[in-house]
Amino acid sequence: KVNYWLAHDNVKTVMLSPVDYNTDIKNYGNVILLEDGRCLFMLRNEPPKGKSYQVWGQTNDTPISLAISQTKLIEVNYSDYKVIGVSLEPYGGSPQPTQPLSRVSTY
């Protein structure tokens, strides 16, 4: 799956640096952004038992849930958002990010 994404022209790959710099974690993985508005989050690890990853999009101050996953590969469309990010949430997700991990600009 990752090879398929990397085979596209004009691929932008961004490291998922931690939002909280008071952690020993250097990065949570990477995100691949394609010009057509699709992206693939590639997280280093599966979420812990009882937790989910939740991907968010943001154009103003309100985060919008884009996907909830128990896997480390998550596909979403980012074309309507200036910022996208990932958080660790209770299983099944939450209405707002409770434990933000990383965020990246889409431009």
Image (tube, rainbow, N blue to C red):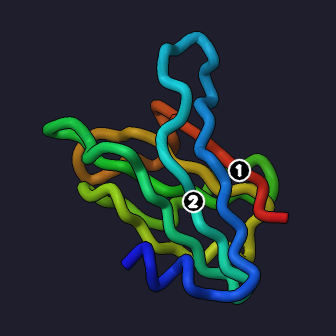
* Element type where label 1 sits in the image: strand
Query: Which of the 4 image quadrants contains residue 19?
Result: top right
Amino acid under disc 2: Val
In this rendering, would 59 be left or right of 84?
Answer: right
Q: Residue furthest left?
A: 49
| Callout 2–callout 1 Cβ contact below 8 Å | yes
| Residue at image point 49% right, 56% down | 55
Q: Earlier in the sequence, mark 2 or mark 1?
A: 2
In this rendering, would 1 be left or right of 5?
Answer: left
| Residue at image point 70% right, 87% down | 9
The label number, if any, that marks residue 31 in the structure image? 2
The label number, if any, that marks residue 4 in the structure image? none
What residue is disc 1 on? Answer: 104
In this view, 92 is above or below 22:
below
User: Residue 29, percent across and down?
Assistant: 49, 46
In the image, 99 versus 95, the foreground residue is: 99
* Element type where label 2 sits in the image: strand
> Which image quadrant: the N terminus?
bottom left
How far separated are the C-alphas under marks 2 and 1?
9 Å
